[in-house]
Image (spheres, helix red, strand yellow):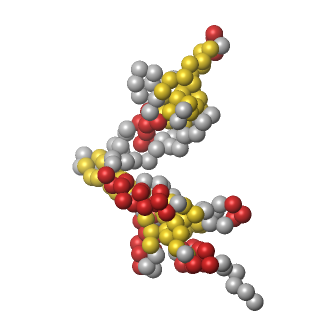
Amino acid sequence: MGSMYGLADLIPRWVAVRVAPCHEKRVSLHLTQRSVEHYLPLYDLPRKWRDGSKVVLEMPLFPGYLFACIPLQERVRVLEVRGVHSIVAGVGGKPAILPDREMSLLRQGLHFYRREPHPWLCSGQSVRILRGPLAGLEGIVARVKGQMRVVLTLELIMRSIAIEIDAEDLMPLGESWPLASGNAAS
């Protein structure tokens, strides 16, 4: 009887691991204890407690996810960790492999930047402008020559315009995204 794994499954590959809400750090600790190479990017979130004291929390940059570098034949070492839901699947239900170069760049360079989560925006998505002179207007995301644009429509005259705008100034409609508003207090 032959092995169900090919030679490619013996080479460590980066995969995205879906974890239970608020379990990213706990799963990271368990993977460290199991000597599994992984990456949990964090960012600093200033908070103000009710008593007025201030603290900076380290929060997951990608809530609900972390990344592991494992030979695919050893994915059970990750899947059996308490708090792990799954390894993100790609075509045919096999684990989706993340590019080594992309993961290397993230691991080496992310800490040089101020970072925080941001809602994923895709072309065709309805958004609200959060800041600036057009704050409160709603439009549709479009990408023109790689630039983020929001198409605003004046239905009364049946005309639309496209404006260039930073993604940080947009919030997807139908979602609650408290970090996008800059409100870090609670």
On screen, 58 above or below 172? below
On screen, 6 above or below 142? below
The answer to whether residue 30 shows anywhere in this view is: no
On screen, 118 above or below 162? below
Question: Residue lying farthest bottom?
Answer: 1
Question: Residue lying farthest top?
Answer: 157
Q: Is residue 134 left or right of residue 151?
A: left
Q: Quadrant of the N terminus?
A: bottom right
**Residue 118 % position (x, y):** 46, 44
Front residue of this view, candidates 25 and 15: 15
Question: Residue lying farthest left?
Answer: 53
Q: State the residue at coordinates (65%, 13%).
A: 158
**Residue 144 % position (x, y):** 56, 30
Q: Is residue 10 left or right of residue 39?
A: right
Q: Is residue 126 left or right of residue 39?
A: right
Front residue of this view, candidates 114 and 85: 114
Front residue of this view, candidates 61 and 123: 123
Q: State the residue at coordinates (66%, 78%).
A: 6
Count of numbered tags? 0
Q: Quadrant of the C terminus?
A: top left
Q: State the residue at coordinates (72%, 63%).
A: 92
Determine which quarter of the picture holds residue 168: top left
Q: State the residue at coordinates (54%, 78%).
A: 77
**Residue 149 % position (x, y):** 52, 29
**Residue 165 % position (x, y):** 46, 29
On screen, 112 above or below 146? below
The answer to whether residue 93 shows anywhere in this view is: yes
